[in-house]
Each structure stands twice: as C-alpha cells, then as structure tokens.
Amino acid sequence: MPKKKSDSSVTIAAPPEPGSARLTEQSAAPSRTALLREMLLIRRFEERCAEAYALGKIGGFCHLYIGQEAVGVGAISALRDDDYVIASYRDHGQALARGVPPRAIMAELFGRSDGCSKGKGGSMHVFDRNVNFLGGHGIVGGHIPLATGVGFAIKYRGGDQVCLCFFGEAAVNGGAFHEALNMAALWKLPVIYLIENNRYGMGTALERASAINDIAERACSYDMPNEVVDGQEVFAVREAVMRAAQRARNDHTPTLIEVRTYRFMGHSMSDAVSGTYRTKEELEEHMKRDPITLLRGEMERHGEWSDQDMSALDEEIKGIVEDAWNYADASPEPALESLTEDVYVNSEL
Amino acid sequence: MPVITYRDALNQALREEMQRDDRVFIMGEEVGVYQGAYKVSKGMLQEFGEMRVVDTPITELGFAGVGVGAAMVGLRPIIEFMTWNFALLALDQVVNSAAKMLYMSGGQFSIPIVFRGPNGAALQLSAQHSQAWESWLAHIPGLKVVAPGTPYDAKGLLKSAVRDENPVIVLEGEMLYNTKGDVPAEEYLIPIGKAALKREGDHCSIITHGKMILVALQAADQLAKEGIRVEVLDLLSLRPMDVEAIVATVRKTNRAVVLEEGWEVAGIGAQVVDYIQRECFDDLDAPVVRVHQTDVPMPYAKNLERAAKPDVPKTIAAVKRVMYLEQ
C-alpha cells in the first residue's frame, strides 16, 4: 500500500473550475474503457518484452513498467497534443501512452532500422518527435534539467504548453533534480515534475536513500506546489496532472507530484523480481493493488464492463502487440552505413 | 581595419547573432546585471532584455541542461561557463545529453547549442582554476570544439558556432580577453574544421591552438633572428581537426613541434602526433616533440607556475631539438 501522507505542509491545489475552457479542452474526458485499454496495451507489451528479452531479441538493459501503468496513462491523458513529455530510462509505458506506435517501439527494442530511434537508442532511448516525446534518458535525474529547459523555451516563445517530466524517486537525491526545480520555480516555468515513487532505486529502498520519506515535501524548498497521489488509481493521477497543467498554463507555475506506485518486476530484466531487497510477501501485497484490476473493478461496479468485454479487449490488445513483434522481427537490422550517420547534422553556413 | 580586443570581438559576435536570430539567447552566471564575469556580455542585457540574457544561479549542471532542453524544442542557446573548470559539473549534460541526443534519437533531435567560456590557466589561480580541458571535450563524438587565439578568429568562429546545428564548444582564454587584433568591420565567418597558417616557414612546423598561438608566434619571431624559419599552424578547430593542413605543413618542413596548454597524457598533441605518424611517417626528419604543461596540478607560487606552463623558451628549445641544434 502507498504510505499514508500525514504532513499538512504539502500543498494540494484546488481542483480547476469545472467550466473553464482549458479544462474542457484537456479533459475531452477519456472513458474508463479508453484508459483501461491503454494500460492493458502497456501490460501486454511489457510482458512480450520480457519474453523477447529471454529469447535474446532484446538486449542491453530493459526496464519494464508493469505495475506502474496507471501513472503514465493517467498523467499523459491530462495533456494536450502540443505538450511535451520526457522520461527516464523506464520509458516504454509513457511512450505508448503518448502515442508512439507499438511497432516503432518494439522495433527499437529489437535494434532494428524501423525503430523509432533507428535502432540506435534501444530500450532506454525511445524518442518520437511526431508526438513530442522527448526521450528516454539513461542517467538518473539527468533529464530533469532538460524538462526545465523545455519549460523555458515554452515561456520564451509565449506559449501555453506544458512539459511533463517523469522520473523515479531515487532521482530526487541527486543535484540535477534540485538545480532544475529551483530554476523552474525561480523563473516560473510550465513544467510538471512527476516522481514515480516505486519505492526502490534499483535495490535501495526509499528509506535507505532519502532523509525524508514524504518526498513531495522537497518541493517546499522551492515554494513549489506539490501533491501526493495514489499511483494505482489512474483517474487520481490524471486529475492531479490536470490541476498541475492548469497551474502551468495559467500561471506558468511548476508543480511537483509524487505518485506512489510499485513495480511488479525487477529493476531491469537482469534483476530478480524479489528476494534480495524486497520480500515476496511485500510484492504480493502490492500486487493486490494492480492498477488494471482496480480500474476494471470500478468499471464492473458501474456496470460498464463484463468478463466478455475484457477478454475481447485483451484479444485485440494481444493482436496489436503480436503485430508489433512481427513487425520488429521482420524489420532489417540497421544498415552498416548508418553506424556513422546522425553523429552530426550537416551544417551549411 | 578596426583594432579591438578579443573580449569585444566576442561581444560583437554575440550581439550580431542575437540581432540576426531571435531564437538565440545567452544564459549563464553573471551574464546580465553584472555584464559578464569577464564583461564579454557587456551591454547585452540592456539591448536584448532579461528573457534573452539570462542570469542563472550557480548551478552549471542545471543550466547546461536547461540549454539542451531548450535546444531540443527549437531555441539556440549560448551557455556561458564562467570558466571551463566549473563546467566540469556540467559534463553530464554536455556529453550525455548534448553530444549524444542526435545519435540516440536516430537523427530526430539536433542540439544547436554553444557552450563557451575561458579555458586553461590565467595567473596564480592554482590547481582548481587553471586547467585546459580540450582533450576531454574533443574526445566526444557529437561535439565540435574550437579554440580561437586571436580576436579575428574568436569573432568568426563564435558566429559560426552559433549558426551550427550541432553542439559547439568554444574555448576562450582569460588571458586573451584583453589582447587586441584586427577585426574587419564587415561581417565574416570562419568555417569550423579548418586550420589557419599563421606564419610561413620551411625549417620546422609548430602546430598549436588557442592561447598557445601567441607563444608559438613569439617563439617563431625569436628563432627567425637566429635564421630559423618556423611555420606556425593554428588548428583553430580541435574537432573536427584539419588533418590535411597538418599533413601539408609537416610535408613541407619535415619537422614538427606540437604545442598545447594542457597536460601530456592523452592530450590533444597526442592526437596530432598520431595523424603525423600515420600520414607523414616517411616525411619526418626527426621525431616530433611535444610541449605542454608539466604533469602536475597547477601550483600557486609564481616561480612554480612559470615552470609548469608551456612557454616561449620551452617552445624554442623544442624546435631546436627537432632540428638537432640542441640536445
């Protein structure tokens, strides 16, 4: 279970005015089914990634998103198409939620020429300019200042977009986080910093790495609005990000959101799911709050959903992922000539 | 032709490029209200306003990353480091973000950014403030690195750097800011990747860059009095490096001294010597000699600092050694 938040110093902003134009524009309210569908796509996609990794089709480091689907899906559902998203190396889920085609991601993971990054980035470096997905970045916390820079560019041009930046709770102990948040608050930049607190930075528990456990409070150092959210509830995440996005658009105010979640897999594919740094019992306790099961349960309570609906959706999603796999498998390896391409842009002065 | 300082040449380049393109902005410590730690950005806050001349907190890692993020979505940042010694804190952003973004995104995200500031030793600033970083930076594919030693080169190369679609490192020199030289009133650019022959000669080549060009030219002047005609090649760009120009001068003189401000091990000079041995093995009349900082952290005491730095007497001795005039 997510830790209870006890401290009243954490600011929770008022929900936006129901009638505001911006809200209407953003919310174009996705149905529960739509969000369930996206979460299920990530789940099934990641399951096939694990399989592909075992078969040697995916190499290197591969960090799966299983258990955290509600975070990426809920948060990104609150954005507009012209907003920006930037993520850490655990980036497949956010990329799928943002609309990067499953084929292009799977081909990237397979190291093929049709990958979204032409097979040169791999699992940790999914990029797609078409949907303003600014990557997958591999150095813990290193991309947080980039998000501040995107916010700076939005303000520089007088735009009203926002930049949503995902990172894990372990990144808040590094200098990049503090430098980036300080400048965003100082300059009033439209950035949403979203901590995916999955309790472990690789194998080190939050309590063993951070002097405070309510890490949203770190925003208080920068007088930044902040909020703690249950990351297994997709609509809770969505609503928190909508509030933050409205603050960013209307007041150019950044927000820090701590989303409490849990990863059901190991840190990466080379990490045991449990045993060393966390117990099987702990894992099983958290798995009772599977975000997909929770949403499905809610839908059933509302009479919106049946087992038949679920199996039909699941078949469809499995088909999409199977198609992505086949596409990736058939895609050629990058041409050897591409080895030396894209190191530089040819610059004509 | 107007004679202006290296500092003013850089200032002209910055202002001209910001007048030309409103996506260009400058960011760094003390660039605005203070008018630049070394006054390179003097008058710019007044001319362009605080959105385009941005004072930052002392947070090199952070504002280098802000620049890269802004470049990802279409701006053209100029990031000033008060010195490259402080930029060490920002290397993750320079190397892991700026240099690699284009490649690891499969060509989708170019980073048109300039990182600039003084490099190398000034006077008695001791170990942490007296370091030449060019070999570290030039090591990285995805970066371009230029090191102008004169006002003319500083202006032309900085303007090219701002217009380049790639991350460009501009290595200036604290001891250079007050030096003066001819700078044309009309606009010009110096292409990145081309060396410049700064003095012709046929006895020996000195191959160098940045601040050391001044040392090389003084050494050549003194050697001329002894009848030794030295050719001086200013690399100007360290990545890409003008190998053709290196080969041409060595084939002409058959002898080379490679002079740099930094340390010996894995220095820029080692790369230059590698090009020479590969391309000019049969042209050499003597082994190439390198001149560089002594392999110690920079000391504070005047006499020790002088002993550690590459200088005119050491360069002259090196030339005489490759000419077998002196043991």
Image (cartoon, rainbow, N blue to C red):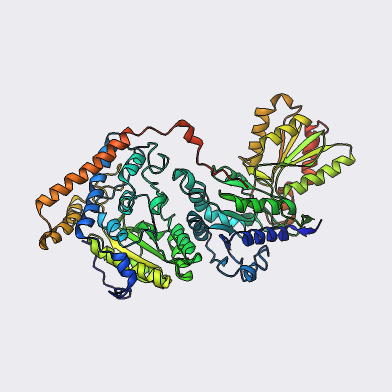
In screen coordinates, is B225 left or right of A310?
right
Q: Which of B263 and A349 is in front in this view?
A: A349
Q: In this view, does B290 lie above or below A96?
A: above
Q: Nearer the viewer, residue B71 or B280?
A: B71
The answer, for residue A212, to whether it is visible in the render is no
In screen coordinates, is A153 left or right of B327?
left
Residue B179 falls in which quadrant of the image?
bottom right
In screen coordinates, is A253 left or right of B214?
left
Residue at image coords 64%, 43%: B238
Residue B180, position in %: x, y?
78, 57
Residue at image coords 35%, 68%: A244
Q: Is residue B307 above or below residue B178?
A: above
Q: How many labels does the image show?
A: 0
Taking the view exactly as shown, the residue that stands out farthest to the top is B282
Q: Could you tell me which quadrant the N terminus of chain A lies in?
A: bottom left
Residue B106, position in %: x, y?
44, 43
Residue B312, position in %: x, y?
79, 46
Residue B68, position in %: x, y?
50, 55
Q: Nearer the viewer, residue A239 or A200?
A: A239
The answer, for residue A78, to whether it is visible in the render is yes
Residue B124 falls in which quadrant of the image?
bottom right
In screen coordinates, is B189 left or right of A94?
right
Q: Which of B227 and A233 is in front in this view?
A: A233
Residue at image coords 56%, 46%: B143
